[in-house]
Structure formats: C-alpha cells, structure tokens
Amino acid sequence: MHWLDYVLVFIPLLVVLWIGIKTQRYLTGVSDFLTAGRVAGRYVISVASGEAGLGLISLVALFEMYYTCGFGISFWSKISAPLGLIFALTGFCTYRYRETRAMTMGQFFEMRYNRTFRIFAAILQSISGVINYAIFPAVGARCLIYFLDLPAYITIFGMGFPTFGLAMFFFLSIAVWIVMMGGQITIMVTDCVQGLLSYPMYVVIVGFILYKFSWTNEMAPTLLDTEPGKSFLNPYDVYNLRNFNLFYVMVGIFSSIFNRMAWSGTSGYNAAAATPHEQKIGGLLGTWRSGLSVMMYTLMAIAAFTYMKHINYQPQATKVSKQLTLKTISDIASEDKFNVVRGEISDFIKSGKAAPELQQRVGDKFDLSKPLTGTEDYKEVAKIAIDSVDKAKGLTFNTIYSQMLVPIAVRDMLPIGITGIMCAIMIFLMVSTDTTYMHSWGSIIVQDVVLPFCPNGLRPEVQLKLLRFVIAGVAAFAFLFSLLFAQVDFILMFFAITGAIWLGGAGPVIVFGLYWRRGTAAGAFTSLISGSSIAVGGIVCQQMWVKSIYPFLSNNGLAEPVKEFLWNVSSPFHPLVIWDMTPDKFPINSQEIYFIAMLVSISLYIVISLLTCREKFNMDRMLHRGIYHTEGIALQKTRFNLSKIVGITSQYTTGDKILAWSVFIWSFVYNCVICFALVIIWNLFHSWPNEWWAWYFYINSILLAGVVGLVTTIWFSIGGIKDLIQLFQRLEGRTADTLDDGRVAGHISLADIKLVEKVEHQEMPKK
C-alpha cells in the first residue's frame, strides 16, 4: 500500500482506541461491564449493534454468496419482508426480553424455567457460540493478509513466524484490550464510533465502483452470461443452484421466526437500552441503518465478478487468478509432503510450462501444453494436483480460494487512497465483531455456568476479574482453533451447522418462554437435547466423511444402498434438496441439517410441555408488568386501530410514529407489495426477459438504495453523535445497584426481590 493508505488506516484506528481509553472511567460495577449500565439511546444501540453484527467474516461470507449466486436468489428473500417488518414494529421478543431486565439469556432461562436448565443451556450455548466464533480470527486475518499481499512468513530476529498467526494475535490482542478496559461500555462506544467513521467510507467506495464499472455495458452483461438454471439476475431461473438456493432462503425465513433472539453473539446489546421502548425503537432504526453498507458489499461482489469474467478485464483477471492460486497453495499446502506439488504449480504459473509430472497428475482434464483460457483454470489445476496428495487439503484449498477471491480482486481494482479506506473498514469490522463476540460468550460462561454455583454471589471486583479472565480464554481458544481447524464448507454453511448446536433447539425455548405460559423446563430440556444432537451428528459426518465414513461404506458394500436411500428420501424435494452421495462431500448440507434439527425440537417442546404443565407461569412478574412495573412509561392497552397495525403504542412520540410509518411504507408497501407481490403477479401473465431483471435490480439495489443510503448516512451520523453525548451524561448521573449482577432466586432477579415482595404484599388484602 501507499503511505497515504497507511495514514487512512491508522488515524481512524487510533481515534477509536483513544475514545475507548477515555470511556473506561465509567466502569463502576458488574452491570456496567455486562450491559453498559442500561442507559444507551436508540441510535447508539442501532449503529453499534449494526457494526458489531456485520463483521469482516460476515462481509467475506456475503462476498462468497453473491459471487456464487448474484442477485437472482436474493429476490426471493423479499418473502421475509413482512416478517422483518412485524418483528421491528412490534419488538417481537426483543421488547419482552428487555422487560425481563435479564443481563444474559441464561438469567432469563432461570427466571422462566429453573437453575439447572440455565446451567445446561449456558454450557451448550457456550460450546456452540465459541466454536462458531472460533473461525472469525482466521477468516479476518487471512482476508487482511491476502488483501495487503503480505508474505506467508515474516522473519523477526532471525526467526521465521507465520504471518497468519501473527496477524490473528495482533488483532485479537487489540480486541481483548478494548474489552478489558470497560466491558460493554467500551465495546458499545468504540463500535458506535467505528460505525460513524465508516459511513463516509462506504460513500467513497460505492461511488468509485459505480464510476469504474458500467452497469449496462459491463456488469449486467456479465451477470446475464451464466448457464441455464444458475442465473445471477432472473429469480425464475435458479433451479440448479445447490447451496444458496430457494431452500436456503426458506430455512432462513423459518429460522428468523423460531430463532428470534436465540443467537447471543451480540447479547450485550439486548439489555443495554435505557428502556424497553428505546430497545424497540433501536431495532426499528435497524431497517434504515444498513444504508450504504448493504449496497457496498453487494456491489463489491458484483464488481469482482465482472472484473474476473468480463472480456474488458481478462488480463487483470488472469493476473488475479495466478496470484490467488500461488497465495492459497503456499498458505494451505505448506507441509513438506506438498513440496513437490507446490513447486510444480509455482513453476507452471510463473513460466507457463508444465512439468511432465504435473501433466500426469492432471490427466486429460487439462492440456497444459497449451495456454489456459479460463480464469478459474489455474485454480482447478492446482486443486487436482493437491488432491493427488491429500483430498481433504484439496477441499480446504477450494474453500479458501473462494473466500479470498473477492478481496483479492477488489484490492487489484482499487486505487491509492481508496485501498486504505477499504483496509480501515475491514479492520473496523474485524475488531468490532471480535470484541462483541468475545464479551458475549465469555459473559455467558461466567454468568450462566459459574455464577449459579455461587449462592452468595461474588464480590464485584472478583466477578469482574473472572469475566476478564474467561473472555481472554475465549480469545485464546479462538486463536488456537483458527490455527488448527481445516474449513471445508462455505462460511455461511459453517455458521449454520455450528450455530445449530444451539439454534437447533433454542428457538422454542426462548419464543415460547416469552409468549406461552404453558412452556415447561421438561419441554425446554427436550428441545435443546434433540436439536443439538442432530447438529453435532451433522458436524461429525461432515468432518469425517472423506477420510472415514465414505471409505467405510465403500469397503463394506454399503455405498450404493445408502446412496439410493438418500436419493429416494430427497427426491420429493428435487431440485431444492438433492442428497447425491459422492466420495468428496457429505450429501446433506449444513442448512438442511439445521432445518431438520429445528423441526424436531419445536415439535418435542410443544408435546412435552403440554404433557408436563401443571400450572401456568406468572408472565406479568417476569416481564415487570402491571403491579410489577419498574421503569419507563407503563404500557397501556388500547383499542384496535390503524396505528396498532404498525406497532404504535401509548409510549410513542410524534417522531416515533413518523419512524414507524416510514418503515411500514418502505418495507411493506414498497419492498413487499410493489417490488415483490406485483412483480410476481406480472410474471404469472408475462415472464420478464432477463434484460428487464437487470434493470429491476439496478433501480432497486443500486439507484434507489444509493439515494436512501446517502440520506441515512447523514441522519444516523447526527443521531449517533447526539446519542453518544447523552450516553456519557447518563453514565455520569446513574446510581449503580450491587445486587444487579445476574443472580436469580425463585424465578425472580435478585435486584427485583424487594419490589416483588412489596407489591405482592400490597395486593394481598385485595384478593
């Protein structure tokens, strides 16, 4: 990078770290470390949680998805627009969870079920969450190494160290330091500042891509030039997509309902708002918050696809393909057993002449005596060569190449200055997610596994030290896991299967726990055990398939019967679900395993709860409603009217009502009715040609999204700065409660026991 790029990287990073240092003085107790004192405003919640929720690994995953399937499949995700609207306007789950005043999901579980379930759920949740998070440092560090074109090894004092390990250690150290300083207070403030600094950066990158690439002459023609059944633009021509297809979308929609709030990677934000109403409005603002960020990562993937496929950029695409192949093979196949293969591929790419041994490895798939014409050909040759030594490494090579393709292509196309801006965004996304996730999983381990075994609690200073120690342990585990784990699946698929250890059975426990009085601990236990068992079985099969399971089936004459069985079971769902058994990969993908786990757990939760329920649960007490009300304006029941459709209650100000209606008009009227339902009806009578779909996505995903993004960038920058100032004022003026440390007694938070005893005693004569 140029010196200007380094300036644009380090100055914003130093600003964030300086602000983080300044905020640590507001830490006064456990409640501050876990929930930032519950004083955050709507814009701080929205901006900070959005920055933490995206993350560099999510950006790479979305690059991977959009590069694989384009816009076409995303059209069908609009089916979920009404659900997202309902969730945002009504505060589905988030409002009730904030009413419980629980610091962690485990505290809510003890209030709703019992202490044993809190501990069991926390152990399962921690295992799922920590393993899921453990590849974050690997993907983030590798992305930066490839983007900056750093060498595989760096020599320090005459000793060689892997750059991959050093990069992970460096960025994890920054994240751990931020968390140690002030917990959720420091995390939330630094995430918010990073988000505010990123907004103008998004504008610059989006502007450059639109300036460099022509939609009508380059982007659209490239997206249209795909094989039948795998269209990047026509949503009616995607039937041959295997991983990111309609089934993937439908499972995502199903999961968004039944796993609402189940994932606790950003749990510190779930309880950080000043009131439940602020929490709800913060979520509502999330509809507008994404603005240019969504447009940026979509455009970058499409721009990279154009850069690699369009004839105008063929020389650049060939250069990128060669660089990435060499980089990936030196990264993935660095062991001694690959020395010969690595040398053969390196010589071939650099000189264009293939050794006879390499031609023998490749066989008749490629004639290496002639120049390769396809930009993916160098990758395919390298993969075949690696497969000849170790097939499992070949899968990992393919995965890493796919993940790093967009970052490498983007680096090659960006000019001086904008390269530094992109690097700064990547570091922001990496650090913000690391801090938030480490804090969340470390807090869950301490609060929901350790604390329940301490009936008298821990002294605040001891509890804070323990929290810091465990969070550092989570970082250490992620570092070691990232060094040793060989990823063989898409990032989003890895998220699905590792998340399913918890999410496979957690959804019913939370949703029904907040809304159904008859849910029982027995139903909750059954739900979690069944869901996690299916998910763990899926992980084992995926990891052991190539080396152990398939060879066992083949050697015992079971391969063909099992293949026929799986094909017949999936045949009613073709082409969405195809279980075609091969030696290279487990036939059931991660999203399908996840869906099976959810179906089984929901069914068992309902059945077991109905069989074991003896008495309805007191929801008002848990939610601090009625006589138990403690904070904010009490929620009042109102008559049904038009405003109630969009979630407007007696707590809404005029500005809140305008916001609610704007979200309703944008999300439902425009996106769902006009851009989805009417388009489907039109296509029932007259199918749109591919060129029309190109203009459809240009208008909606680029032109209009750009206008909305510019407006929201200014809007959220002003609102975020104002809310940050108010946050510091509230932190100065609040009074800390030493009992507010996450303990529960008799389904009641320890901090609320005096209130409950008082109001219930006052109500007794009236009964």
Image: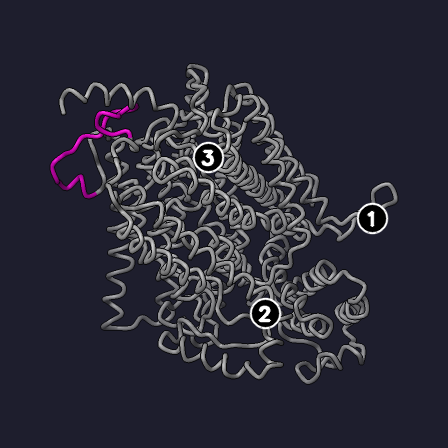
The residue beneath circle 1 is 160
In the displayed structure, 325 sits above or below 117; it is below
Task: Please state the extent of the stretch shown in magenta in the rendering.
Answer: 624-645
The residue beneath circle 3 is 268
Viewer-nearest residue: 594 or 57 = 594
The residue beneath circle 2 is 545
Q: Amino acid at mark 1?
A: Gly
* Residue 655 percent across, percent down from the top left: 26, 31
- Of the residues under marks 3 and 1, which one precedes in the sequence? 1
* Residue 326 percent across, percent down from the top left: 72, 63
Q: Main secondary structure of the magenta part?
A: loop
In the displayed structure, 82 sits above or below 89; it is below
Q: Secondary structure at mark 2?
A: helix
- Of the residues under marks 2 and 3, which one precedes in the sequence? 3
* Residue 748 percent across, percent down from the top left: 35, 29
Disc 3 or disc 1, which is closer to the eye? 3
- What is the distance, in whole Å, between disc 3 and disc 1 at their CAs? 39 Å
Residue 46 is drawn in which quadrant? top left
Residue 639 magenta-highlighted: yes
In the displayed structure, 232 sits above or below 648; it is below
